[in-house]
Image (tube, rainbow, N blue to C red):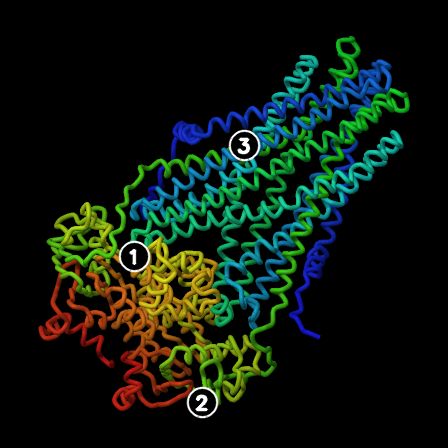
Amino acid sequence: MTTTRDPARGGPVLAGSIRAFGRHVGLAALFLCGHQVGEALVPVLVGVVIDSALRTGDPAALLGWLAVLAADFAFLSVSYRLGARQAWIADVRADQRLRLLVTRRLLDPAGGAERGRLPGGLVTIATSDAKRVGLVNFALPLGLAAFAALVVAAVALLRISLPLGLLILLGTPPMLYLVHLFGRPLERRSEAEQERAAQAAGTAADLVAGIRVLKGLHAEPAAVRRYARSSSDALAATVRATRSQAWFSGTVLMVNGAFLALVALVGGRLAAAGEIDTGELVAAVGLAQFLVDPLRELGWVNARLAQARASARRIAELLGAEPAVRGGAAALPEHVDGAVRVRGLRHGSLTGLDLDVRPGELLGVVAADQADAVALLRCLAREEDPEHGAVLLDGVALADLPPELARSALLVAAHDADLFAGTVEENVAAAAPPGRDLAPALAAARADQVVEALPDGARTAVSEQGRSLSGGQRQRVALARALAADPPVLVLHDPTTAVDSVTEAEIATGLRAVRHDRTTIAVTSSPALLAVADRVVLVDGGRVVAEGEHARLLREHARYREVVRG
Amino acid sequence: MSARALLPVATPARTLQVLRELLRPRRTRAAVAFAALVGGAAAGLLTAPLLGLIIDLVASGAGPDAVTWPAVGLVAVAVAQGLLAALGVAQTAQVGEEMLAQLRERLVDRALGLPLERIEAAGAGDLGSRVTEDVAQIGEAVREGVPALARYGLVIVLTFVGLAVLDWRFLPAAATAVPIQVLTTRWYLRRATPLYAEQRIAAGAQQQQLLDTTTGLATVRAFRLTDRHTEQVRDRSQRVVDLALRVVGLQNGFFGRLNLAELVGLSAVLTTGFLLVGSGAVSIGTASAAAIYFIGLFNPVNAVLFLLQAVQAAAASLTRIVGVADLPAHDEPDPVRALRPARVRAEGVAFAYGGGPEVLSGVDLDVPPGTRLAVVGPSGAGKTTLAKLVAGVHRPDRGGIRLDPPPPDDALRAAVALVTQEVHVFAGPLADDLRMARPDATEEQLRTALARVGALEWADALPDGLRTPVGSGGHPLTAVQAQQLALARLVLADPPVAILDEATAEAGSAGARTLEAAARQALAGRTALVVAHRLTQAADADAVLLLDGGKVVESGTHPELLAAGGPYAALWAAWADGR
């Protein structure tokens, strides 16, 4: 038997989403049914008015039946309001619930849910797909109500005349099927159209965001041409889709009209033969017209369900993604000394790396090949567990710890760490113990200079993953955040590359001071940082090949000199 | 901060004029569309009298066969109505879509041609929201609003005509609904437009938050910010939920009031029918037809009134789009490629931003063809301003900047490319990003350019090679990769003169070396000005210019300046310490 990847099942996601708001869905269905009954009664009551008041000329009957009509309007209006409200609540809350489920899974410390997907794709799942599944909670009551309306209309028709009622009831399903058949390709086409239109809008926004780059290269004409292409693609798709949409609506009009003619013909003959009266004929014709809406609604609900199933499958796939690292249940002592031992680490390009970091030591790690640095950092950060060997913190293997516990004791500040929306201050304080004074961290990272230069100081807003700051500013704020977190072990990856040499030297001194009794590992080739390290190791070919003080290695080790000086 | 100088907004009169201009080449199609819609609506109106005729025939005791011809008439009406409506709606949508496409293309063309200062003065959001939200708003109106509005509007007008034909006294009866509808619509419009705007903002904020979180997943995990980010997503999403419920409340109020209008009008029509039938003025069939007409108005009237909001919002968006699209076309000189490198000479250049203090004064420089000048100095020395002046972004207040040989038409800008440390990776396939700099580049040229800046290896390693989507929402690139991409674009653009403004700053130490090598390769054979803070770039350049306080402090070759023992030598000593 071949084992294929178990395809994620959307059914439970869809069912769970409906069940979570079952009460609202049920109430909505109830009220919307009431609304449909009220709507169905309007033509019936008009028929009664014509028959019992207009034909007889009885003013009392007129007033009486108009009062009944008013009551029906009140009933249908209130039912609609209550029903629509419940259905919307069920819809938007289900949408939100799924969005949060997706977000929680993405942010799960064990990771792995984002594998193989781009950020834009993840956002689409958390928004569009969640919305489509949520919409089922709106569509379902609507569908039930439409079905109820069909039943009411059927009963009314059968009461008026058995043959006429049967004609309408047996005639509508084929009509519905026909409409469905026409509508199907349309559904897909209009989706493609929306995607194109969104793409054109996205292109425009992106070009405007990159306008400085365009102007620097005089690429504005090229950009305008690209947008024009995207825009005319969108235009072609839209025109195609609206054209088929128009012909679809036209066909529906024709089919409905022809059906109405048939009902009028049969009903007229029955009335002429005296089998039904005039009022009943008016009511029957009105009901035949009325049926069109619930029928169309059922078609719409059906299409939404199909979409929701596809979306639910994507959500289920993401929620059920394999974690990137194992959980682990070991614990750390209350006070972490910060002794890090790496034993025989083979992972990626590493070929058996051994490393001992004493508690409180500032260790420089110079990697001749960035791939070695990346592999080591990923293991330290527990983004991945090592293929062979182990990383031990105070004698406990990192892989045996719950990932968030491991990260609380050993923090890896990545070189390309993102800043988040919020103020500079909020970013720096993000991982700091509550109430901590941020000033020392800001000063050590020389982010105090950044704050001074910003228009609103530490309260300046950061936007677009920090892109609103310059590279040097962003790097210093990110470093201040890592220092403010004050973990027992801090691993810094190339923290000072976008700052000038004077500032870099100041940061080296500040780092040394602020982390004086805490273990710090700096993976870098910056001479300024390496110069303040207690000890430096050189990683080459996947293992440690030299260690000692920076100055001594610089003097004595040719390969080291080559790597550091470049 | 000074008040924002928003981009222009067109007057309603000018907006209408632009719409007419856009419509003119399509007026035949528009006329066909209009005629078809009128015909379709008119055909639809025959339904009620035909039904009325059947009722009258039955009431008058005619035989069963008498109803056959009216029934056939109903079929003919259905076919005509369907065909004409389809034709009308399709043509209307096409006319609208084409006009919109032309307008949005003109908008983007003018938008990208705006000077940077103008965009910055307005705030980046102003232009961004015009090219996205305003265009989307009008797109929605064109797609959903205009055809429906045209069709339903005609149905309503013609239904009233039909009512009048049946008996004019049905008209005032039907009109009893109008005051309620007018008041309801005004009530709704006042509330809906700001509420929908809020809703769009909330949806945008949610999207931005999710992009923020998903792009930074690794950082969120490392710093254990999971709870906070979940909370933020919840907050943004709660706001969306709250607004959605407010929208439901508003729409419920709107439709509820319209239900009342329906009831009032229907009762009036029935009562009028009662009186007219009683006085023998109309037959019972005519009274029935009037009632059927009026019931047929329910949906079109509700739809039209509901769409008025979209139309109102679209009109506001339209004035904002026309405001920018109406700006004069800018005549961008074609970029100069692959000429022999030019000598860059500046004499006595001085510059101040908007009447402020001078940030540069009396700057001279001379860069021989094909050589590299490094501009160094503390921040605030005027390095970036000098780069922008040479690039032709700003014009010097005094003094002049010349190229020798001069570029065609003396267009300084066209011959000079500027790469800053602000990296933007364009969303879409990597190859498309590169082709921004040279649209006709072959795959081979792209690969050569990438190889030249040392980026081919990782580009090929991307999941889908050069076709991998990058930029916003795409495959994330590191700062080094993004900057290499910027340099590859420079190679493709192939200008005779290039300026790098700290273009190698965004990288790790190892990355910085990668980028310096890439920059060297990208600049080979060009005259170049390099604004740098890594002094290795200065040591590597043909000449060095030290700026401070907007003035040239020292200039010469690296060894000359070291030998001189001046400020540059001191700067170098600080830099080289420990290396």
Q: Which residue is tagged 2?
A: A354
Percent position of residue B444, x then y = 36, 62
Ranked by sequence position, the earlier of labels 1 and 3 is: 3
Q: Quadrant of the C terminus of chain B?
A: bottom left
Q: Horizontal placement of B570 versus A457: left or right? A: left
Which residue occupies 48% across, 45% down? A233
Q: Are marks 2 and 1 on the same chain?
A: no
Q: Decide: marks 2, 3 in contact (CB < 8 A)?
A: no
Identity of the amino acid at label 2? Asp
Question: Is A468 placed above or below B514 here?
Answer: above
Q: Secondary structure at mark 2?
A: strand
Label 2 vs label 3, nearer the camera: 3
Q: Which residue is tagged 3?
A: B91
Q: Are marks 1 and 3 on the same chain?
A: yes
Quarter location, residue A455: bottom left
Chain for disc number 2: A
Identity of the amino acid at label 3? Gln
Q: Decide: marks 1, 3 in contact (CB < 8 A)?
A: no
Distance of mark 2 from mark 3, alpha carbons? 74 Å
Percent position of residue A47, x then y = 81, 24
Q: Which mark is residue B493?
A: 1
Q: Horizontal placement of A310 versus A406: left or right? A: right
Q: Secondary structure at mark 3?
A: helix
Chain for disc number 3: B
Quarter location, residue A542: bottom left
Chain for disc number 1: B
Q: Horizontal placement of B83 versus B276: left or right? A: left
Percent position of residue B122, x then y = 35, 45
